[in-house]
Image: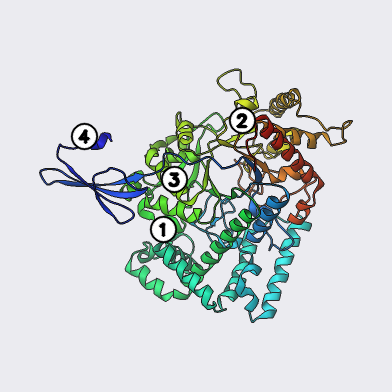
Amino acid sequence: PAALAALPAGTRLRVDTEQGERLDGVGRLPHGVHRLTATAPDGRTADAHLIVAPARLPAPAVRSYGLLVQLYSLLSRRSWGMGDLGDLGELAAWAGRSLGAGFVQVNPLHAAVPGAPADPSPYRPSSRRFPDPVHLRIEDVPEFAYVTDHERARSLRERAGRLREGVLEKDALIDRDAVWELKREALELLHEVPLGPGRRAAYCDYLAEQGTALEDHATWCALAEVHGSDWHRWPEGLRAPRSAGTDRARRELMDRVDLHSRLTWLTDTQLTAAQRTAREAGMPVGIVHDLAVGVHPRGADSWAQQEYFAAGMSVGAPPDAFNSRGQDWGLPPWRPDRLAASGYAPFRGLLRGLFRYAGALRVDHVMGLFRLWWVPEGRPPTEGTYVHYDAEAMLAVLVLEAARAGVVVIGEDLGTVEPGVREALRERGVLGTSVLWFERDWTGDGRPLPPERWRADCLATATTHDLPSTAARLTGEHVELRDRLGLLARPLEEERAEAAADTAEWLDVLSRLGLLHGTGGDTGTPAEEAEIQAVHRFLLRTPARLVGLWLPDAVGDRRPQNLPGTWDQYPNWRLPVADAGGRPVTLEELAASPRLHALIDVVRDAARAAVRERGGVRDG
């Protein structure tokens, strides 16, 4: 409004809407990203994008609890060495129907950079626009039933079985590279099977819908097979998606481009099926997908959309109390000027792709919609600076696309948060993330925040993939682990004492609230298990709209999935869900676990009690 008021008197305004209409003036406009043209009395004209979005996203229809898990870590007796989309569908169906869960949250399933050894982190993908076929359940692809080379198919299943047994029974780490090698071979076999008329029509519709974006992604995958995954080292004529050399190579590699396009379609199909299964199981939300904060500098997105990325820059974090040298995450940032000039087309396309199969979206480091710490290539993070984005426009696009898809949005707003960010997110209906151990009265006495003072607009959890499991935190084992790896900044005894005091303070709160019961002389529940149950009773006492249960907590897992500050000292992103003794637990064993069911009973009882206290507010 202020910008329009500054226009010369008599300026004519015309809006070409996203829906294809041409309107005079900026009166009541439909939601969308439109083109505004202003014509001054002297004939001068100027254009700008105009984003019209709902004021805010509606809150989740019902309050619900759900499971949080890193999908690769959840193996069943049918998966090929790591958790897959078949496992996700099974987990969602069981959790919705048998546990009353309202959602399942997973790690980013974005396409990874190919090549061995691949970066196991799901937070440094090749592409955020398209999913990774390593997550496919091969046997669930309809064409698998019609593979004619039965001996080769049998051999692949046997090799997959050995991979699976190695992880589940021989203490092997999850080997994504080995899993992909097997699945790639199987998918090559499947590609030889002609699609039936109906499947062919569905595939063609997908190709038409995804258009140039998918063609670029598949072309990059095909070129990476020939020239390696670092496009900066490709022949010069192939370093741009619109060059004559790339057009020629695309034609020459047409079969491989089609293969990678079809793999993306198959993965999209199974992702969509998992969300449909979750909703059919009664989940009000379903699958919560995770949007990584950026992409790999040598991956598909940075090649196909390179005009939108800042060359020679990386995203990171400034120095703070925990890391005096700052951080460099190795992810190229989007250029805010190019985003704005395009009407935020890359961001909109990214969101639409994810919303195809998501019931909710967790936005990693949601503060990145407001500003990011840019680090010049070759310079230490201490020499970086904050670059601001048009947060109002970024949030408008997020709310617009999420509202169209009927998707809940959760912002990961942990750590250092710029003043006003949480308030802006709340005003637009974007939920935050609250982790029990960090919820203290930081502006007062610093003590644990009482449950009634927690914010309602959040996903409340006891831990995350980057933090110690609840069992490890309660026992202090997370301190011992960091000590063994040389990660402590202070003497071990100081760290132990501080961790023990923190835990004792929280246990005292749980006890005073009457939540810590069921130990030894009461029902015989082991103390640690009773404490984990009490933590979740507490979470259900808060007004949080969503309450998440870290699935490894349900079986007493000690090990974090990721230990920040480590690279090869710790097996980040390669551990299966395990019990308190470190023995891997399959999906089938989870479903039969007495410890898990005891915790779910506690969660259900606490949820019902919370409903009664709030006068009948419905829970999912």
Q: What secondary structure is marked by label 2?
A: helix
Q: Residue 374, image x and y in percent?
A: 42, 40
Tell me which label, 2 or 3, sits earlier in the chain. Answer: 3
The mark lying in front, picked from 1 and 2, is 2
Whether label 3 touches label 1, CB < 8 Å:
no
Q: On the rendered image, what quadrant is the C terminus found in?
A: top right
Question: As shown in the figure, which amino acid type bears the numbered disc 1?
Answer: Trp
Q: What secondary structure is marked by label 3?
A: helix
Which residue is under mark 1? 303
Q: Residues within 10 Å of mark 3 (few under 14, many from 20)?
A: many
Residue sitting at the far bottom: 148
Tell me which label, 1 or 2, sits earlier in the chain. Answer: 1
Whether label 4 touches label 1, CB < 8 Å:
no
Q: Residue 436, image x and y in percent?
A: 64, 32
Residue sitting at the far right: 521
Which residue is under mark 3? 398
Q: What secondary structure is marked by label 4?
A: loop
Whether label 1 touches label 2, CB < 8 Å:
no
Question: As shown in the figure, which amino acid type bears the numbered disc 2?
Answer: Phe
Which residue is under mark 2? 438
> Which numbered tag is attached to residue 6?
4
